[in-house]
Amino acid sequence: MRSRSYLALVVLIVIAAALSMLVGRGNLADEALRGVFLEIRAMRTLAAFISGAALGVAGVLVQGLFRNPLASPDILGTTAGAVLFGNASLVVFELFGLSLLGFVAPALLLPLGAIVGAFVALLILVFLMRRSEDLLVLLLTGFILSSLFLSISSFLMSLAQEHWELSRALLAFTLGAVTGAGAPQLLFVIPLFLVGLNAAYFFGRPLDLLLSGEEEAKSLGVDIGRTRLLIALWIAVLTGVAVSLSGTLGFVGLIIPHLLRPFFGIGHARLIPTAALAGGAFVILADVLVRAIPSRTEIPLGVITGIIGAPIFLIILYRMYRERENG
C-alpha cells in the first residue's frame, strides 16, 4: 500500500512538471523563442516546487510542534514577518534607490528581505516567550505578531499607491506569485532550502516522541525547550524561503500533511520527505492552473491555492468532527 503511494507521488510530480513546461503564454512551435519560453517556465516550475515543498515541510513541523493538526506555518508570525520585510525591501529600493549600501544586488533584495523578516519575527517571538513555554501563549503571541506585521504591510502598500509599478509589485508579492523568481533568487535560496529540509528530517524522531506527550518525551531524553526553539528556527527558515520566491500562499502548509497521513502514517520520518514532494506538486499544479485560466492578467497564485485549499480544509475539518462525534 505504502509503496503504491510513493509511486503515485512520484508520478504526480512528473505530471505536474511536464504540464508546467507545456502550459503557458508563448508558442513552443516558434523555434526562435522556444528556448526562452522553456527557460522561463523551468525557473517558474522550480520556484513553485521549492515554495510548495518548504511550506509542506513547515506544515508538518508546526503541526508536530503544537500536536495540533489545525496548525499552519503562519501561526508563528514568520509568514507575515517575511511578507513585511519583503515589501519593505521593495519600497526602500524603489523609492530611495538603496540596496544595502551596494552590498546586495537588487535582484536579491526581496528574497533576502523575506528571509530576514521571518527571522526577525522568530526573534521577537523568542524574546517574548523567554519566560514561558506554554503553547497557548506561543499561539496567541504569533497571532498578534501576524496581525501587527500585516497591518504595517498594508500601511506600506497604501504609501506606494502613487507609484503604480511599485504598488503592483507589492500587491503581486502579497497575494502570491512565482513570476519574479529567476536564477539569482533560486541560487540564493536553494542552499537554505536544502539545509532546512535536512534539519527538519533530523527532528523527525523528537517530534514522534512529542506526540506521546511532553513528560514521556522528557523521560526519553528530549530537551523540550531547546527542541521547540530549534524547530521554530527551521520553520522560520523554510517559511522565509517559500515567501521569498512566491509571496503568500495560503493553506499549503495546512492541508498537505492532512492529505498525506492516511497514506503514509503519522511518523515524521515519512511525512517530511513526502510533504516536500506533495507540497511542491500542489503549488506547481496551482501555477499551471493560473496560466491555463484565460485572462488578460494572471490571477495571483495565492488566490488559487486559497480557492483550492479552503474547501479541502473544510472537508478535513468536517471529517475530524465526525470521527470525534462517532468515537
Image (cartoon, rainbow, N blue to C red):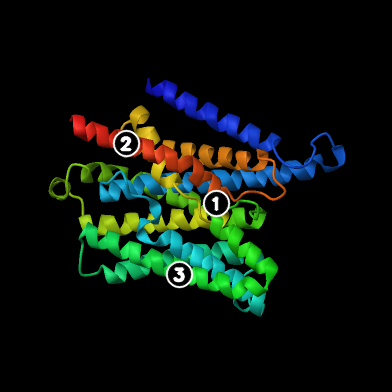
Q: Residues within 10 Å of mark 2 (few under 14, many from 20)?
A: few
Compared with 89, 292 (above or below) is above
Name the residue that disc number 3 marks. Answer: 151
Q: Nearer the viewer, mark 1 or mark 3?
A: 3
Give the secondary structure at mark 3: helix
Q: Position of residue 203 (x, y in %)?
A: 32, 47
Query: Which is more N-terminal, label 3 or label 1?
Result: 3
Q: Is residue 103 visible?
A: no
Depth check: give the residue in front, 170 or 78.
Answer: 170
Amino acid at pointer 1 = Ile
Query: Which is more N-terminal, label 2 or label 1?
Result: 1
Q: Position of residue 279 (x, y in %)?
A: 48, 41
Name the residue that disc number 1 marks. Answer: 190
**Mark 3 vs mark 2, CA separation in Å:** 32 Å
Give the secondary structure at mark 2: helix
| Label disc, if present, on residue 106 of the rendered structure | none
Q: Position of residue 67 (x, y in %)?
A: 25, 46
Quadrant of residue 265 within the rendered picture = top left
**Mark 1 vs mark 3, CA separation in Å:** 30 Å
Depth check: give the residue in front, 283 or 32.
Answer: 283
Q: Going by the image, does 230 lie left or right of 136?
A: right
Amino acid at pointer 2 = Tyr
Amino acid at pointer 3 = Ser
Name the residue that disc number 2 marks. Answer: 318
Residue at the image point whose x is 63% and y is 67% from the top: 167
Depth check: give the residue in front, 40 or 177.
Answer: 177
**Mark 1 vs mark 2, CA separation in Å:** 37 Å
| Quadrant in which the N terminus appears | top left
Residue at the image point whose x is 21% and y is 55% from the top: 224
